[in-house]
Every structure is written in C-alpha cells, then in structure tokens.
Amino acid sequence: MRLRETLNDWFRGRIRETASAAVRYKLASRKANREKSTNRSTKSALYQAALATERALWTVKLAQRPKSFWYPYTTLRNLKPIDQLLIESGFNLSELCRGLNGKIADIGAADGDLAFFLEKMGFSVDAIDFESTNFNRMEGIRILKEALNSAVTIQSIDLDSQFSLPSERYDTIFLLGILYHVKNPFFVLEKLSRIARRCFLGTRVTKKAPNGHSLGRYPVAYLLGPEECNNDSTNFWIFSGEGLKRLIHRTGWNILAYTTIGDTRNSTPADENHDERAFCVLESNAYSVSRQP
C-alpha cells in the first residue's frame, strides 16, 4: 500500500514537473519569437526604405507622365528577398557594395528605381539598359534623372554584343531579372566576373520541364519559345537550380548566399502560376586576377 502511494506521489510529481517544463518552454519560445520578430523588423529597414523610395518615385513619375508610360513591374520589390537573404546569411548591403572603385552598376535598370535608390544610399551608380528592348526606350529613366537632379550615369548597352560597360571596375553589380533576357548568359556572367568584385543576381529557375519531367537535379537550361513566356520573345534561358549554380561557378563566381522564392516544388519555365526565382550574392574569383598588369 505504501509502495503504491509512493509511486502515485512520484508520478504526480513527474507530471507537475513535465507540465511546468512545457509551460516554461512555451513562454521561452514565445519570447524568442518576439525577439526574433523585433530583430528582423529592425534589420529589414532596408526594404522599408525601398518601399518608401518606390512610393516617392511614383509621385514623381505620375507628375511627369501617365502610369501607362512607365515600366509596370515593381523593381524595388526585388530587395525583399535580397534583404531576407542578407539577414539570414549575416551580410550587410552597404558593406557588400562599398569598395575601392566607388562604383556600382545596375544592369537592366528599367526606369532606374534601383539605381536612384542606391544613389540615395550614397553610392555612385551606372544605370544600364538597352533602348531597343526597354519598356519606354529609356525615356523614363532620363526623365527621372532630370526631375531628381540625379548624378546617375545612364547608358544603353546591348548585352548580346561584345559589350563594354561605362566603368572599367565595379565594386558591385546588380543583375536582377536580366539573365533570362540574354542570349549568351555564360558570356555575360564571365565578363562581369572580370570587372566586378561582387554581384547580386536574381533570375527565374525551374524544377520541372513543361511536361512535368523533373529537371531539378540536373545542371540544365530550358530554351523558351518566342511566345512561351509572357508572350515576350526576349525571354530565352530558364535554368534549373543546379544549372544556375553550375553556370555561376563555371563563369568565375563563388556563391556567398543563395535562396529561392515562389513555387519551390513544382516550378516550370513559363507558367506564371509555377514561377520560382533564385536570388544570390556572388563574389568573383576572377576579379583579382584580372586586375593584375
């Protein structure tokens, strides 16, 4: 009888201890999540500043031309996954962009939103696009430059040619949403690795072919038909994730940080409902060699 009472007391004590530990764990988890959320909100000031800049730029844009004139996509929204990637990997945008050359390039600048935002952060920026394929023939970015009294350098360059950029060396290049628009992405990335120390790269990737066959584990690229994706004949190569990583390494870059967003399970090359994007921070391993006399 005494043994049974002793065992019951022991079990009740263990239950109380377990329940108490569970409560302590739940409270600690909630506190950690609150601290993590607060910390993340504080650190995401970059994206909040980008949104504020986007709103300010639209005020300027609409004072100059109707909405239909301007590039319809929100280019500064690309900074949301980049901001999150930087937070998770412990990097800082300003530190990554700052260097001896004092120059940044925004390639595929559209109306220049990112270029003007980077200039606002204190950087000297070359904004590069191609008049023939730009939404408003680069009239928009030139209008904004004048309205903002900006010092951003603007130049029309065909990346499908044997191109040269306005500056010989760059600390950082932004190449967001452009890789699938160039016919020879290998040439472009390889050339950029020789003149830039770092690169922020964003492009569409795919897990599957249009027929559903898995491509995810193969280092391959899918060549789009001229009207297959957004009815835009300037869309060409959509890489698998492994294909993009292989391309990056073969063209003289190291991956410092990498993430994907969107449909990360069943993405396809062209379906807007199965769109996956890769964002990465790259560092050149050819840059220092190319600087030697």
Image (tube, rainbow, N blue to C red):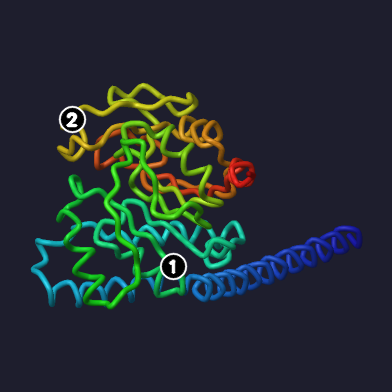
Judged left or right of residue 75, residue 280 is: right
Q: Name the residue under label 2.
A: 226
The residue lying toward the viewer, choosing from 123 and 59, is 123
**If the image is split into quadrants, where does the N terminus sit?**
bottom right
The amino acid on which the numbered mark 2 sits, given as a three-letter code, is: Pro
Q: In this view, does 41 lie above or below 195?
A: below
Judged left or right of residue 181, residue 22 is: right
Specify which label sits upstream in the sequence, 1 or 2: 1
For mark 2, give the secondary structure. loop
Q: Residue 158 carries which label?
A: none
For mark 1, give the secondary structure. loop
Q: Is residue 237 above or below residue 136?
A: above
- Between marks 1 and 2, how big is the CA–CA gap? 36 Å
Say which of marks 1 and 2 sits in front: 1
Q: Position of residue 4 (x, y in %)?
A: 85, 58
Q: Mark 1 points at which residue?
A: 124
Q: In this view, does 13 lie above or below 258?
A: below
Q: Residue furthest right?
A: 2
What residue appears at the point 36 percent right and 36 percent down from the top-left corner? 162
